Image (cartoon, grey):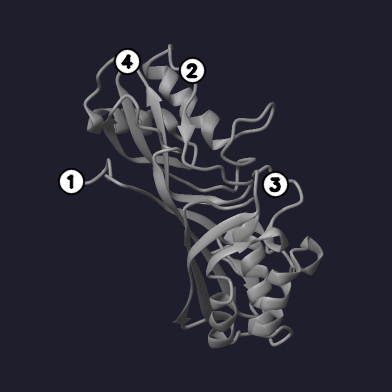
Amino acid sequence: MPRFALKIEYHGAPFAGWQRQKEQPSVQQAVEQALRKLDPSVDTIAAAGRTDAGVHGLAQVAHCDMVRDWDPFRLSEALNHHLKPAPVAILAAARVADDWHARFSATERRYMFRLLARRAPVTHDAGLVWQVKQPLDRAAMQAGADRLIGHHDFTTFRSTICQADSPMKTLDELRVEEIARPDAVEYRFHVRARSFLHNQVRSFVGTLERVGAGAWTPDDVTAALNARNRAACGPVCPPQGLYLAGVGYKDDPFAP
């Protein structure tokens, strides 16, 4: 059976997360239902990573096996037709080897978190950012972020329901970008690693926001990391500002 990789964009607000769940809408379910309109034999799809309720996808990657050897462009067009009106889009499809796996072949995951500082309520960005009222100190947040880069025991920044075998992870990038807007200041947190713990990125951002607000120092971030205790973490920020921004592979299946 031919195997296809799918690059998927979605707005997470209407969904209980990526993973199929009983009696709750999920992104996985929406894509699988569209696939079965084309091939009733499709059982399930596998994704590069799960996202929680309210989290968005800019370039999630999944794979599926189908009976027909579709032209990739026609497959993506047909799926987008059947996905309407769900806020899910297939950005690209690609034929891949039978042993290629969206999750296990991945070499890195990239996340972006959007934090918007302004006093007026959010309108156009509602559901797409985490809003705070006052501007933050980007340099201080970056100094705190730098304390987290590298190979560490991230127990402090791991959800108590995380199912990973080990809290040890290597964080390759945690970069804080500041974007001036006429009505606000936006901070974007760019995070990159081979894999992540449950709630790890949201725990990072919630903690660094405290640094930017002056309630914590970069040394407090180091102390929290070294505590290896979930109680030492700063507030976990809400999900709506988080985006799965991309997945890396040794050979990009979507490369021209």
The amino acid type of the residue labelled 1 equals Pro
Find the distance from the CA under tag 3 to the CA under tag 4: 34 Å
Find the distance from the CA under tag 3 to the CA under tag 1: 37 Å
For discs 3 and 2, the disc positioned in front in the rendered view: 3
Tell me the residue at 46%/83% (across/down): 180
Q: Residues within 10 Å of mark 3 (few under 14, many from 20)?
A: some
Label 3 residue SS: loop
- Tell me, for residue 1, which label it has, or none: 4
The residue pinned by badge 1 equals 256
Tag 1–tag 2 contact (CB < 8 Å): no
For discs 3 and 1, the disc positioned in front in the rendered view: 3
Percent coordinates x, y for residue 189 in the rendering: 51, 69
Observer-nearest residue: 210 or 81? 210
| Quadrant assignment, res 93 | top left
The residue pinned by badge 3 equals 162
- Tell me, for residue 27, which label it has, or none: none
Label 4 residue SS: loop
